[in-house]
Amino acid sequence: MARKTANDDPLAPLTLAVGQEELLLDRAVREVVAAAKAADADTDVRDLSPDQLQPGTLAELTSPSLFAERKVVVVRNAQDLSADTIKDVKAYLGAPAEEITLVLLHAGGAKGKGLLDAARKAGAREVACPKMTKPADRLAFVRQEFRATGRSATPEACQALVDAIGSDLRELASAVSQLVADVEGTIDEAIVGRYYTGRAEASSFTVADRAVEGRAAEALEALRWSLSTGVAPVLITSALAQGVRAIGKLSSARGGRPADLARELGMPPWKIDRVRQQMRGWTPDGVAVALRAVAEADAGVKGGGDDPGYALEKAVVTIARAARSRGRG
């Protein structure tokens, strides 16, 4: 869970989100943007990477406007800013502009520590977004996710969800959202088991594995068997999404040992080895096509179409073709 300082006003002149947990960093940004848009629906939001914030850019973005518009300026990976740009940011911190909220996302390490210290000295509202490496932290995160929705889940259900999903916070949050949307009343271990463990888990991930490997016929066979045995269609779309996202994450990561990549990507080492074998036929365009197919299937499964089974078959075929996109020209 993201932890905040005593100054908990999202519209404070400066918010400092510190850590490497992408889900929490994104939520810190969304919270500020939502508060700004609630205050002024016409708020201008600028979301910048270090290479987009050159010397002089911040002064441009924060200069007074004739229309006195509210603005949110988000700077991601602030630790990677150039020395000259860091000077600009430090100068701005001494005299922040009215109606402008600056959001700095910083990894929190030694790199760029001068900027981190300057932001804290300037009285930044700070949101801690650390990587959750301990099972106890992930369990606490799941409990908080349920509490935030106003729903109750038994301790055993929360533990079962962590055991089934693993260390990816986005997937844990997605699983909580899915259970809350689908299930009425208290969520217990049996419900989690029906969705995310045992035969259902094995069969849904078999569908996903065969699809991302480009084995369309086997994937379709596994899909039809899964549906015939009562596996929830939403569980299959979740498995497909996880499979394609894993391909995308690993293909864009730097090379290295499985243990190093596992820490960087939040996957167990054994999964790194499996995904490396599965990604051989993939291209970046193929990943994009597959992600769109999963999104369309998810909409179909959740009521956007008349036949969830057909939506899933279409997605499986599209993903399997995308897995063979390299070399087809």
Image (cartoon, rainbow, N blue to C red):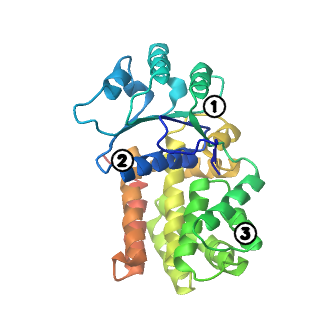
Seen from the viewer's position, the closer of residues 260 and 94 is: 94
Relative to 203, is 29 on the left or the right?
Answer: left
Compared to 156, does 23 lie above or below? above
Cβ atoms under marks 3 and 1 closer than 8 Å: no
Lower sequence index among marks 2 and 3: 3
Residue position for label 1: 108
Q: Which quarter of the rendering shows the C terminus?
A: top left
Instruction: Give whichever of 255, 296 is nearer the camera.
Output: 296
- Looking at the image, which residue is at 73% across and 53% down? 137
- Give the number of the disc on residue 285: 2
What residue is at 62 percent from the left and 23 percent from the top?
A: 117
Q: Is residue 328 left or right of residue 107?
A: left
Question: Could you say where residue 59 lies in the image, as x and y percent from the top left?
Answer: 35, 21
Discs 2/3, front: 3
- Amino acid under label 1? Gly
Q: Position of residue 162 (x, y in %)?
A: 70, 62
